[in-house]
Amino acid sequence: MKKSSIFLAPLAVLMLFLSLFSCNAQEDATNQKDAQVSEATIRSSFILDRLMDINPTKEKIQLPEEDDPANQIAPYVRRIFEDHNGHLWFATNQYGAARYDSSSLRYFIKPDGLAGNQVTNFMEDKNNNLWLSTNGGVSVFDGEKFKNYTTANGLPHNWVWSIHQDKSGRIWAGTNGGLAFLSGPQFIPFELPLAKIEDSQVRFSPKLVRCIYEAKDGTLYFGTDGGGVTVYDGKDFRHITKKEGLCDDNIVCIIEDKQGNLWFGSMFGGVSKFDGKNFTNISTENFIGNNECWNIFCDSKGDVWFSSEGFGVYRYDGENLTNYSTDEGLGVKAVQTIYEDSNGILWTGGGGGLYRFDGTSFFKVVKRGKRKYSLLPMGDGC
């Protein structure tokens, strides 16, 4: 592992008084192909080999056909989430959502009622219903069946990137066409004011809301595509952009650490840490290998983990940055998710499948046996 000491010096002061994948939804284009996958076969259960076991020898797990992509949960794992039952959910790029209940793995796709086969995020509401944002709308799972919301139910766009329930109980969805909140049976579009940015690098849509985060004080932060962060306190809006010291205006992830610092992950500028007054930016200019950072996670120890495209993950313990990549067994360079479960096991996923961490090294998670059904591609995989 590669470790470097850093002194996080402030780079800019946030002026709080300031006023304020494109991937088109692949809806009907894949419907006929999806129907070719039978519900009976997709519901097959698979035992995960050594999923929860920590390898005491710290050697790489060698299993038959370990490198066969068909033996992975999925070639691309976008998000990981643990529900109130202790079940682990894995969002995949084209095979829906996979649920692991400590003994078997079950896949949920469109024939099971899911809105879309690409799942981008999870959220569990106050009634323990599981919400999934997908490329075909929003799905809510009550443990038995799905209920879906699409543009027919008020969503601005069926390609949904983020889902969140705030402290008041309101459910928000960030889509390729803008933000919306649920009111009764319908989503209501909620227009976010656009920041005035010169030469904005919009990758998909200026209305895209990639991520939604609620700080401890109830303030909502919306990460946008080329517009920085839009902040909403329930009454007023303000913007946080590169002009105020943010690392980049294409924000894909926002978290708050145990000290109350806000962290922002970006497409083109690396990572920003904001302590309420000053920004500290971590980028290729100082410590990390690539400025594309898709996920940030604060673990139970208070360490902050974040991804760097092509360079695995980094852990920041308050003083040092430690890099974990192929030398430490992490075969996922394009990491899109980092997650710690209730047993203290750290997981990563992305392009390359699913891995877990034993404190020193990462190990691939695979299934026993081969899949007995065909899996469908999803176009360009945005």
Image: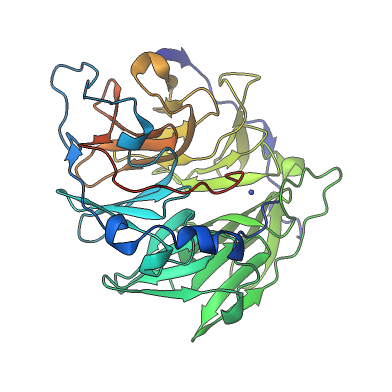
The residue located at (64%, 49%) in the rendering is 21
Figure check: 141 above or below 370? below
The residue located at (60%, 73%) in the rendering is 155
In the depicted view, which residue is nearer to us: 173 or 370? 370
**Residue 45 x %, y %:** 21, 52
Q: Quadrant of residue 318?
A: top left
Quarter of the picture containing the N terminus is top left
The answer to whether residue 244 is left or right of residue 154 is: right
Question: Furthest-right residue in view?
Answer: 198
In the depicted view, which residue is nearer to us: 346 or 100? 100
Question: Furthest-front residue in view?
Answer: 36
Figure check: 66 above or below 41? above
**Residue 245 x %, y %:** 70, 38
The answer to whether residue 368 is left or right of residue 19 is: left
**Residue 330 x %, y %:** 38, 23
**Residue 325 x %, y %:** 42, 20
The answer to whether residue 330 is left or right of residue 202 is: left
The answer to whether residue 11 is left or right of residue 216 is: right
Residue 75 visible? The answer is yes
The residue located at (29%, 56%) in the rendering is 41
In the depicted view, which residue is nearer to us: 247 or 179? 179
Figure check: 127 above or below 358? below
Residue 169 visible? The answer is no
Q: Quadrant of residue 356?
A: top left
